[in-house]
Image: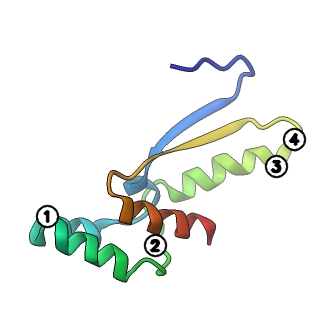
Amino acid sequence: METYSDNRLVVAISSRALFDLEESHRVFTEEGVDAYCQYQISHEDEVLKPGVAFSLTRKLLNLNRLERTNRRVEVVLIPATVLTRALRIFNSISH
């Protein structure tokens, strides 16, 4: 585990908390891996809706604007386990 000495708050968040992935999760549990991968590929360019932790994450990151030279908060996104979901999440973050 890495240790920080700069008194920065480091928060780890899952992709399912940051974005609403309930529909894709439903496809996975009800239709299986192949249908899930196809679902992610066919929806790759659709921006995901915010999840339960999206607002909190945005507010935490806005604390960095108070002092531009000293970042107070760092958010670490726990990666998706499926590459097709990871691409969709990356596209939504970029949005």
Query: In front: mark 4 or mark 2?
Result: 2
Residue drawn at (13%, 64%) of the image: 29
Q: Which residue is mark 2?
A: 48
Give percent across and percent down for residue 31: 11, 72
Residue density around tag 2, few if under 14, some if 14–19, many if 20 or more, within 10 Å: some
Q: Which residue is mark 3?
A: 65
Tell me which amino acid carries mark 4. Answer: Glu
Q: Quadrant of residue 6?
A: top right
Q: Which residue is mark 4?
A: 67
Q: Is residue 90 above or below residue 78?
A: below
Q: Nearer the viewer, residue 83 or 10?
A: 83
Q: Which residue is mark 1?
A: 29
Badge 4 or badge 1: first in the primary sequence: 1
Q: Is residue 67 above or below residue 56?
A: above
Q: Is residue 82 left or right of residue 75?
A: left
Badge 3 or badge 1: first in the primary sequence: 1
Q: Secondary structure at mark 4?
A: loop
Q: Quadrant of residue 43?
A: bottom left
Query: In front: mark 2 or mark 3?
Result: 2
Residue density around tag 4, few if under 14, some if 14–19, many if 20 or more, within 10 Å: few
Q: Quadrant of residue 85?
A: bottom left
Q: Secondary structure at mark 1?
A: helix
Q: Mark 3 and mark 1: span between their CA atoms?
A: 40 Å
Residue drawn at (68%, 48%) of the image: 61
Q: Mark 2 and mark 3: span between their CA atoms?
A: 25 Å
Tell me which amino acid carries mark 1. Answer: Thr
Give percent across and percent down for residue 94: 62, 67
Q: Mark 4 and mark 2: span between their CA atoms?
A: 30 Å
Q: Mark 4 and mark 1: span between their CA atoms?
A: 44 Å
